[in-house]
């Protein structure tokens, strides 16, 4: 009996110690709130998952994240009105960014880390000064930690692997807009790479494909897919999608010889691109049904091998994922105009400010915990964790000193909202990726560098066009309304011209299109944008 009593006492003592440790761990864990306008962050902080468990072990933090399915900016505005913000706010709207800063609702990052974590790598050489300067120029101070940072100084911080250095340097001119061909179909029909590098050669190849009446699993092959519902891009300028890509290839630039900015609508090259797509519709290479294809439909058709030629934003396709698609691809980067114009590639030569902007609210009651979390998630250890998961299980190192996901890691990344693997876009560091990532996991690098790599392509710095003051258009409600009207009208009328115009009436219909744009006050909108462009010429030199 004494022996049993002693054993019970010992068991009770052990249990008390265990409970005490658990209670202590819980007491040391701080939950921080996080509002994001977009991105993938686990909505449930499940510590049975390796990524979340490790983050909590390393930082003492758990996260309650909110990412509204729609109208996130409005929800954030309501928070501003109510005067209560979560610990971390992640947004992209520059008008809201300006409001947060002017209302003194968010911390200056230098001051924040000097106060709550002075040994953070972020203020001790770990954050690139060129990106910081770009943020300061926009915001009047360093208030945000941006995602998707990529810059010369950030490259200096991280370096490059000698095995991949040449490839990553070529990505300085990476461009999503382009043209890609199904190489298996080319080989089957005897179409060569030279055949599809010119405007007339492409039309001839499309005729061959059309007449071949090819099928895949009983479904017909599309000779061309001109970016589906995204054929004219998603903005009021129509400088993306298939039309934007072709206009660039045919040499279109939104500026006259005096440096005045205007939309591509007024260029001969845009009209040329529109006529090319109209010819494709006339000859049956594209049809009205394709103009309803959303991103998912475009990608499904491309991956199934049912598209011979894709023209537009290639990231929407998965076309180049040959390991999973079962066919090869080919891209010349550009289609050369029969009129002899040189293709142009606009690239902003200024230092980018990243994409998602992470702010720390001055309302936070847990500044030390927030500082530790941000520091860890942007460190090499944190980036390695959330990008690649558990070592040896979710990821592995190659002989070249690069890292790639295992099959298990890829499955988890495809379920990032649950597992956390690949989930924390808000801290994406593209120079970290370039240092460690095995490029074979990014199938788009090769085709998306082809536009800039084509020797015919003329590159120019579009910084003055691309860097309007924060919220410049949005702050002018009259001009914003005009831009929305132009976008709606152009999206409908351009589709009508492509699908129904004839060679005989094309010019008249295009002239009528431009006249209606004038009636919708597009010249006023162009003049308003041009004011900012002219100011940029002065400030940028």
Image: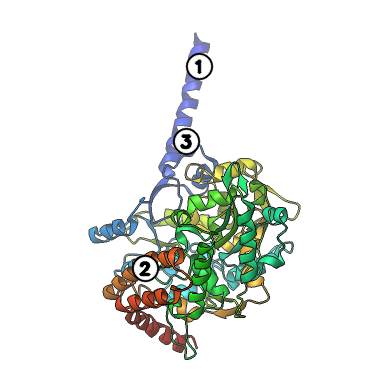
- Tell me what residue is drawn at x 48 percent, y 55 percent: 290
Read off the residue under disc 1: 6
Q: Is residue 368 left or right of residue 299?
A: left
Looking at the picture, does residue 523 appear above or below residue 318?
below
15 and 230: which is toward the camera: 230
Describe the element under mark 2 as helix, strand or loop: helix
391 and 58: which is toward the camera: 391
Q: Is residue 362 left or right of residue 166?
A: left
Read off the residue under disc 2: 487
Quadrant assignment, res 356: bottom left
Residue 149 seen by the camera: yes
Read off the residue under disc 3: 21
Instruction: Quote the CA–CA distance across marks 3 and 1.
Output: 23 Å
- Tell me what residue is drawn at x 59 percent, y 47 percent: 304
300 and 359: which is toward the camera: 300
Q: Residue furthest right?
A: 399
The chosen color scheme is: rainbow
- Tell me what residue is drawn at x 49 percent, y 62 percent: 147
């Amino acid at each position: 009996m004494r022996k049993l009593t002693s054993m019970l006492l010992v068991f009770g003592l052990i249990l008390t110690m265990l409970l005490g440790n658990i209670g202590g761990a819980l007491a040391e864990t701080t939950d921080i709130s996080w509002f994001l306008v977009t991105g993938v962050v686990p909505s449930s902080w499940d510590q049975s998952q390796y990524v979340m468990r490790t983050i909590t072990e390393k930082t003492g933090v758990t996260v309650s994240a909110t990412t509204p399915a729609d109208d996130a900016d409005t929800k954030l505005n309501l928070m501003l009105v109510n005067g209560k913000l979560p610990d971390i706010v992640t947004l992209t709207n520059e008008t809201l960014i300006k409001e947060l800063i002017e209302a003194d609702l968010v911390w200056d990052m230098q001051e924040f880390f000097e106060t709550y974590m002075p040994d953070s790598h972020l203020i001790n050489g770990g954050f690139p000064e060129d990106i910081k300067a770009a943020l300061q120029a926009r915001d009047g101070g360093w208030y945000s930690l941006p995602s998707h940072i990529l810059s010369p100084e950030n490259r200096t911080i991280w370096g490059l692997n000698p095995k991949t250095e040449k490839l990553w340097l070529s990505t300085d001119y990476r461009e999503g807009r382009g043209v890609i061909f199904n190489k298996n179909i080319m080989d089957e029909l005897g179409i060569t790479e030279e055949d599809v590098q010119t405007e007339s050669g492409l039309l001839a190849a499309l005729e061959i494909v059309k007449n071949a009446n090819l099928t895949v699993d009983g479904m017909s092959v599309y000779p061309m897919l001109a970016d589906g519902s995204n054929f004219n891009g998603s903005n009021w300028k129509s400088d993306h999608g298939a039309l934007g890509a072709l206009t660039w290839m045919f040499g279109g630039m939104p500026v006259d010889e005096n440096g005045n900015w205007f939309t591509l609508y007024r260029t001969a090259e845009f009209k040329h691109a529109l006529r090319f797509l109209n010819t494709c519709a006339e000859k049956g290479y594209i049809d009205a049904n394709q103009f309803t294809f959303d991103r998912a439909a475009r990608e499904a058709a491309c991956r199934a091998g049912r598209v011979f030629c894709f023209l537009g934003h290639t990231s929407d396709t998965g076309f180049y994922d040959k390991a999973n698609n079962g066919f090869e691809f080919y891209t010349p980067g550009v289609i050369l105009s029969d009129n002899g114009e040189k293709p142009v590639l606009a690239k902003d030569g200024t230092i980018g400010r990243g994409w998602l902007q992470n702010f720390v609210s001055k309302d936070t009651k847990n500044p030390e915990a927030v500082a530790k979390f941000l520091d860890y998630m942007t460190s090499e250890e944190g980036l390695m964790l959330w990008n690649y998961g558990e070592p040896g299980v979710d990821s592995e190192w190659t002989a070249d000193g690069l890292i790639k996901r295992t099959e298990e890691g890829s499955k988890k990344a495809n379920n990032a909202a649950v597992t956390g693997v690949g989930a924390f876009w808000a801290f994406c560091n593209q120079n970290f990726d370039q240092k460690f990532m095995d490029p074979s996991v990014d199938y788009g690098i090769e085709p998306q560098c082809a536009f800039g790599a084509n020797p015919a392509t003329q590159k120019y710095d579009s910084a003055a066009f691309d860097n309007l003051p924060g919220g410049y258009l949005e702050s002018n409600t009259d001009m914003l309304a005009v831009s929305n009207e132009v976008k709606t009208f152009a999206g409908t009328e351009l589709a009508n011209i492509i699908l129904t115009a004839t060679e005989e009436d094309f010019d008249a219909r295009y002239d009528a299109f431009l006249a209606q744009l004038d009636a919708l006050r597009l010249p006023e909108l162009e003049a308003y944008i041009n004011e900012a462009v002219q100011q940029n010429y002065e400030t940028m030199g």
